[in-house]
Image: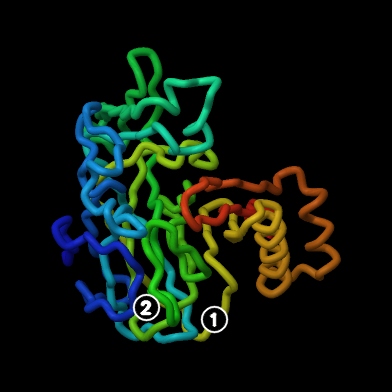
């Protein structure tokens, strides 16, 4: 099986000029070993998010959120759609979160001086589950609080059309740092291809995350991701789409948040009309009346140029 090793998964931009690290056939299974978002800086609670101490933080934007790639998909061309299927995510033995001055919405808090006056790093140990592995393990938040490891890919995409976008705050119809909890095992992610070969990148795995990633970091971890890439020729989609076993999700990123929510919903309506036989009137009325229609706010962080990421979801039984 082909693999991008962790030593090679240290790109910090989606750049069509990069030399492909792998060339794969459609449907071929391969692996990418990922770094955490700090490229290994946070190992203990003594490692604080002080910018002057962090390698790469003398650059603008900082060298954070490393990704592996690009992966060249044989036969993929501009105007096709790339289908990304995640077969497995095996996380590392720990994850971390870092808060402190000027980090997140409470980084300048006067009510909670401990959040704005000092840097804090929390390390979460991962406990194996009944299988003896971390695939069904738990995140140990504290002595009395834990939850299942629910890993997902925070940053993935293809090289943008003309620009170079950083893996830290780059976002667009081609993908980017979107931090969508539904980009996970068993789901299919659809992305519009901008270049011959697709030029796919992936990184920034989280062991778990709540809606919005409120502090700006979640349970950041290293991982090994097993996946496959397929191509749908000559298909147009406006932004990332997710196909789950029991539902479909239309995604959009924008500011303010209401633009992201409205556009994701409008694009779901168009998906229903163009591919699932709904009339425009029925699709429009469905999203206001169906009790199972859902809006997700996946990412809403004040980090550089990041936009807010919303998803509009509808169960497949209504298709």
Specify which label sits upstream in the sequence, 2 or 1.
2
Check if mark 2's residue and mark 1's residue have beta carbons within 8 Å.
no
Q: Residue at x 57, y 79 (%)?
A: 236
Task: Please tell me which residue lies in front, 311 or 64.
Answer: 64
**Quadrant containing the N terminus in the rendered view:** bottom left
Q: Position of residue 37 (x, y in %)?
A: 31, 48
Q: How many marks?
A: 2
Q: Secondary structure at mark 2?
A: loop
Evaluate whether residue 271 shows in this view: yes
Q: Position of residue 239 (x, y in %)?
A: 56, 68
Residue behind mark 1: 235
Residue 175 in the figure: left or right of residue 35: right
Residue 52 in the figure: left or right of residue 235: left
| Foreground label between 2 and 1 | 2
Task: Please tell me which residue lies in front, 125 or 228.
Answer: 125
Evaluate whether residue 314 shows in this view: no
Residue 91 in the figure: left or right of residue 286: left
**Quadrant containing the C terminus in the rendered view:** bottom right
Q: Residue at x 40, y 68 (%)?
A: 165
Q: Is residue 286 above or below residue 300?
A: below
Task: Please tell me which residue lies in front, 203 or 189.
Answer: 203
Q: Position of residue 184 (x, y in %)?
A: 41, 50
Q: Is residue 109 above or below residue 272?
A: above
Task: Please tell me which residue lies in front, 317 or 158.
Answer: 158
Q: Residue at x 59, y 57 (%)?
A: 248
Name the mark on residue 113. Answer: none
> Would you call the spot at circle 1 few (<14 residues within 10 Å), some (14-19), or many (20 or more)?
few
- CA gap between label 2 and label 1 equals 14 Å
Residue behind mark 2: 198
Q: Secondary structure at mark 1?
A: loop
């Amino acid at each position: 099986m082909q693999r991008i090793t962790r030593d090679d998964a240290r790109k910090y931009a989606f750049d069509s000029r990069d030399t492909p690290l792998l060339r794969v056939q459609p449907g071929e299974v391969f692996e990418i070993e990922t770094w955490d978002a700090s490229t290994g800086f946070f190992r203990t609670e003594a490692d604080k998010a002080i910018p002057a101490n962090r390698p790469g933080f003398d650059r603008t934007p900082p060298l954070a959120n490393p990704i592996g790639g690009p992966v060249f998909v044989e036969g993929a061309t501009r105007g096709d759609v790339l289908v990304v299927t995640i077969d497995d995510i095996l996380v590392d033995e720990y994850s971390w979160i870092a808060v402190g001055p000027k980090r997140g919405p409470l980084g300048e808090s006067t009510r909670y001086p401990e959040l704005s006056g000092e840097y804090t790093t929390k390390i979460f140990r991962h406990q194996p589950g009944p299988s003896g592995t971390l695939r069904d393990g738990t995140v140990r938040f504290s002595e009395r609080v834990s939850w299942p490891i629910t890993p997902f890919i925070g940053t993935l995409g293809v090289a943008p059309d003309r620009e170079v976008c950083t893996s830290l705050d780059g976002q667009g119809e081609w993908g980017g740092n979107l931090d969508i909890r539904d980009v996970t095992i068993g789901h299919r992610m659809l992305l519009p291809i901008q270049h011959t070969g697709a030029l796919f990148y992936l990184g920034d795995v989280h062991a778990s995350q709540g809606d919005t990633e409120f502090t700006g970091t979640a349970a950041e971890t290293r991982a090994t991701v097993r996946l496959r890439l397929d191509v749908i020729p000559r298909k147009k989609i406006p932004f990332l789409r997710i196909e789950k076993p029991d539902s479909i999700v239309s995604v959009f990123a924008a500011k303010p948040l209401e633009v992201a929510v409205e556009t994701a919903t409008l694009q779901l309506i168009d998906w229903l009309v163009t591919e699932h036989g709904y009339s425009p009137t029925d699709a429009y009325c469905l999203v206001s009346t169906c009790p199972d229609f859902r809006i997700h706010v996946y990412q809403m962080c004040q980090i550089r140029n990041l936009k807010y990421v919303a998803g509009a979801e509808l169960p497949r039984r209504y298709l």
